[in-house]
Image (tube, grey):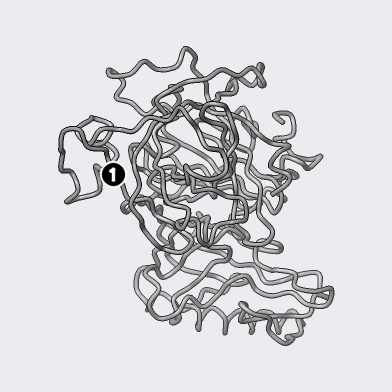
């Protein structure tokens, strides 16, 4: 978390109807957020600067969150935030998906339901707007900042911070809702309706708009694409089959394998029936590669000696055999000691709502482009194979020039 201070970059959030509020006086292809991984919770944390006087607030990134929410009464307390009326256009847009709570009473405040994606709890919070410090989103002029108003977010209680990384005061929602981070930046800055995440075990990046300038056209154009499904504010992809070292598993009998993508789950989880088939096949593949099983370490179900240099390759086969999300090496294994490593895929239990939930470890050093306008997900698989990384602190990273 301390490394966040080295990567502070300010942004503008301006939720509006384009004909109701003026857009900012500049346009850009992209806007950047540096993201640091918290070692204790394995959560990904971004930082914003807001309010009067200007101060910084750390927020846990939630890929499926509806909007940004924070505890407005602890940490940096702003004197400039303004409450939103329950009869305003902003309130109606914020509650668009919140059926049954669209009542409007004159001279009352707008209440929304901040969701803690880590604990799964919902609370009540007031919708507010405030000043945000905005760093230049022009890559040739990074560092020049100004301030803008009308950034919408929710104020939640201190109790709602339960389960978040130490120092984090809320969550940054990236879902499809009209006041999520990508939606607000798209309308305020004027770039395309897409965003990308490139997570790292140290310092990664979140960007809205086009990533060509950041990662280079060679990497951006090498992405494979698969249909992106949205339900409420969560993002899903369809997995046709799973292969381990090229061998197809008999998981198709379990029905459609819909996979949810989540930044608040550290490791990929599978419903028990799928995990049982997957883990058995993985052990068989590992045995053929002369890997030695060792005692398991919670929360993992399979652990091995770390002496061997290679581990089985995992392929998530998507809409065709030609489109595969390959997971290998550090995206599949977690080092738990000098002598052992464990498979970063867990049994999610019998009641897991999605057959597969793809977690943070499997997304690291993988450029993921969420194209909301065309409902497509672009993915690179491991950038390490392309001689770069998602870590902005790495000497090989294409991100280094922006920080």
Local crowd at mark 1 within 10 Å, few (<14), some, or many (≥20)? Answer: many
User: In the visual, does 300 lie left or right of 398?
Assistant: left
User: In the visual, does 289 lie left or right of 128?
Assistant: right
Pinpoint residue 162: horizontal percent, then vertical percent: 50, 61
Place residue 68 in its image quadrant: top left
Residue placed most toward the observer, 237 or 115: 115
Pinpoint residue 114: horizontal percent, then vertical percent: 38, 50
- Disc 1 target residue: 111
- Residue at the location (67% across, 71% down)? 312
Residue placed most toward the observer, 396 or 316: 396
- Residue at the location (16% across, 38% down)? 104
Whether residue 96 can be seen here: yes
Above or below for 199 versus 280? above
Above or below for 77 versus 320? above
Whether residue 385 can be seen here: no
Q: SS for tag 1?
A: strand
Residue placed most toward the observer, 338 or 326: 338
Pinpoint residue 272: horizontal percent, then vertical percent: 45, 81
- Residue at the location (50% across, 82% down)? 277
Pinpoint residue 375: horizontal percent, then vertical percent: 37, 43
């Amino acid at each position: 978390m301390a490394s966040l201070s080295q990567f502070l970059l300010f942004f503008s959030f301006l939720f509006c109807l384009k004909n109701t509020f003026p857009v900012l006086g500049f346009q850009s292809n992209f806007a950047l957020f540096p993201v640091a991984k918290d070692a204790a919770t394995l959560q990904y944390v971004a930082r914003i600067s807001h309010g009067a006087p200007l101060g910084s607030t750390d927020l846990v990134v939630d890929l499926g969150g509806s909007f940004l929410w924070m505890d407005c009464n602890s940490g940096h307390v702003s004197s400039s935030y303004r409450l939103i009326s329950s009869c305003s256009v902003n309130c109606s847009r914020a509650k668009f998906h919140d059926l049954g709570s669209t009542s409007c009473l004159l001279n009352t405040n707008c209440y929304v339901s901040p969701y803690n994606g880590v604990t799964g709890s919902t609370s009540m919070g007031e919708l507010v707007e405030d000043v945000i410090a905005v760093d230049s989103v022009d890559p040739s002029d990074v560092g020049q900042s100004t301030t803008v108003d009308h950034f919408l977010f929710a104020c939640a209680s201190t109790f709602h911070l339960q389960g978040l990384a130490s120092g984090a005061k809320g969550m940054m929602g990236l879902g499809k809702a009209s006041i999520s981070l990508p939606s607000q930046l798209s309308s305020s800055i004027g770039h395309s309706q897409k965003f990308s995440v490139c997570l790292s075990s140290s310092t990664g990046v979140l960007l809205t708009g086009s990533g060509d300038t950041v990662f280079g056209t060679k990497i951006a154009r090498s992405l494979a694409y698969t249909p992106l499904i949205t339900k409420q504010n969560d993002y899903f992809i369809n997995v046709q089959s799973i292969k381990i070292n090229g061998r197809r598993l008999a998981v198709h009998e379990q029905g459609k394998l819909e996979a949810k993508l989540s930044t608040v789950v550290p490791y990929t989880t599978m419903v028990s029936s799928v995990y049982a088939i997957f883990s058995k096949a993985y052990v068989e593949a590992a045995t053929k590669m002369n890997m030695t099983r060792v005692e398991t370490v919670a929360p993992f179900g399979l652990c091995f000696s770390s002496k061997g240099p290679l581990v089985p390759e995992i392929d998530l086969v998507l809409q065709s055999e030609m489109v595969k999300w390959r997971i290998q090496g550090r995206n599949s294994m977690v080092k738990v000691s000098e002598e052992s490593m464990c498979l970063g895929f867990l049994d999610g239990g019998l009641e897991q709502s999605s057959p597969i939930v793809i977690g943070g470890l499997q997304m690291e050093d993988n450029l993921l482009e969420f194209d909301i306008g065309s409902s497509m997900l672009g993915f690179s698989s491991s950038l390490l194979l392309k001689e770069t990384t998602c870590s902005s602190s790495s000497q090989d990273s294409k991100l280094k020039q922006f920080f």
